[in-house]
Image (tube, rainbow, N blue to C red):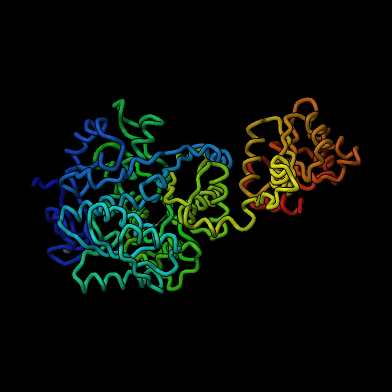
Amino acid sequence: MENKLTVECLDCGYQAPYMPGSLSCKQCGSQWRQARYDYSNLGRIMPALLPHRPFNLWRYRELLPIYEYNPSLSLGEGGTPLIHAANLGMMLGCPNIYIKDERQGPTNSFKDRQAAVGIATLKEAGINEAVLASTGNVAIAYSAYAARAGIKLWAFLTSSVPAEKMREVAIYGTQVVKVTATYDEAKKLAAEFANQRNLFLESGPRTLSSIEAMKTLAFEIAEQLTDLLGPDHRDTNDALLPWRVPDWYFQSVSGGLGPLGVQKGFDELVDLGLTQERPAMAIIQAEGCSPMVVAWKKGHSTAEPVRSPRTHITTLATGDPGRTYTMLYQHMVESGKGLFESVPDEETFRTIHVLAKMEGLSVEPAAAVAFAGLIRLVRAGKIRPDDLIVVNCTGHTMPVETSVLGDNWARNVSLPVEPAALTPQEGLLEALNQVTADRYPRILVVDDFSDARRLIRRILQSQGDYTIFEAASGRDAIQLAGQELPDLIILDLMMPEIDGFAVLDALKANPETSSIPVIVVTAKELTPEETERLRGQIQSLLQKGEFMNDEFIDEITSLIN
Ligand SMILES: Cc1ncc(COP(=O)(O)O)c(C=O)c1O
Ligand SMILES: [Zn+2]
């Protein structure tokens, strides 16, 4: 068997040829090891190999710790789309946001990569039974691949994992062990169990295949950005090089395996000579369990464990990130870019609605954390408007959606039980009336730019249930206001012919519309005379681009309720 990779110990530097199934350094016993490849050779051959391979994770197999690619174990992992988030970009004033849609993996999370490569390496090593601890998604992904490969799996899950996720683990035939304790404690228990029975233990960043699997995200992102935007012509004459990488890579983080692997991927692209730059990593945690962020903000290279996580997002409840944090920290300090940030759960839950209603992406809370972090950092001015941003959309909502929808998310229709009195036609009409019976707050949006109207509509729809009317001119605005008598008017000032000031005069002159609250949105600085003209006529004045701040939504809610 040709030795395609070497394993280097991060503690003593000892290098050994890769052996499937070997778990620690032969010299010092450390489990912290890293795979190294012949980058100069691979950098030459990979660009010629890739165009002939399907777009999935195995197209980079020369850079993965397997000797023989076994397609019969595959479920179609990797190769997820990179989606331009035009609406979110418009809302945030950052047009270059792309979403790596990892929900589209075989079990709907980015952990499919880890499981696909992990199970393939176990199979090569002849291992038939394995143990892991998980907050849900790792167990689901590993279970699917283990089932396919005929490997027996034990999954230690904290009791806070939603029952639906636990059942999904069980349906693949995995033995579920529910642990009523924190995730860190469940990990310890799983480790003891594996040790006692001499079974293989999947241990995140210390499992070589896990880091190697996650780095394929970096490879795919660079290839996809290059396809979409062309190579990054900095200082080469080569028409195909260097590949393009984002300025920022965003990811929600629990234990930190994902960013550690992705970071290694971007480093390897440089080693291979395919790229020149590395992205800044934005590592986002849930505020109630954010040991990395706390340590980072204090400038510490080690993280103080959080003993009792206080977040509803149990998927991200790793209290003790251990050495993974230190490795991420050191990389950030050495590269001089990147950051750690946290977001409160409410912001994350609000972001789920924004993504679903503006981009058509239903994501699970753990994935939304990264997007909530993006929104927060853009607002804080940490991201430049022209930055190229990729967000890892790590998982789908499905089993956890109960916590984010609240009540009254469907309209109930009951067809009459006694059809005798009504004809079937009447019965149906009666039922349909029930569908349209409740009244949502009605808002008239006035702006001559259709993009601006569309943006306000999307923002409103992402934040609640409203009936929205649009007027593209002052004339239409006056007419629609009189006809529909909305609960609120959002009015642009600068419009040709009848401008916002004239619309206001007309509204105030009509007793039917004079008391409708008005929020004025303007792109320009007002003169003192203009400000004076608005005094007493409107409820608030917003600068364009300020829409996404919470005051806008709070203001609307307070005016119509
Ligand atoms: C959907 C989702 N997002 C993010 C994470 C964080 O992953 P990690 O910190 O292990 O890379 C997880 C971990 O299970 C997850 O399931
Ligand atoms: Zn060693």
Relative image position of residue 208 (x, y in whole percent): 23, 56
Query: Taking the image as drawn, is residue 398 in sight?
Result: yes
Ligand 1 shows up in the quarter that is: bottom left
Q: Residue furthest left?
A: 1
Relative image position of residue 463 (x, y in whole percent): 63, 49
299 sits to left or right of 413: left
Quadrant in the picture for the C terminus:
bottom right
Rendered position, 178 above or below 402: below
Rendered position, 520 above or below 495: below
- Residue drawn at x 27%, y 55% is 147
28 sits to left or right of 52: left
Query: Taking the image as drawn, is residue 298 in sight?
Result: no
Q: Would you identify the image quadrant in which residue 57 lies?
A: top left
Q: Would you identify the image quadrant in which residue 104 lies?
A: top left
Q: How many marks?
A: 0
162 sits to left or right of 349: left
| 186 or 130, nearer to the observer | 130
| 39 or 289, nearer to the observer | 289
| 230 or 192, nearer to the observer | 192
Relative image position of residue 399 (x, y in whole percent): 47, 56
Relative image position of residue 414 (x, y in whole percent): 66, 51
Q: Would you identify the image quadrant in which residue 496 lies?
A: top right
- Residue drawn at x 19%, y 44% is 69
- Residue drawn at x 21%, y 37% is 43
Rendered position, 552 above or below 42: below
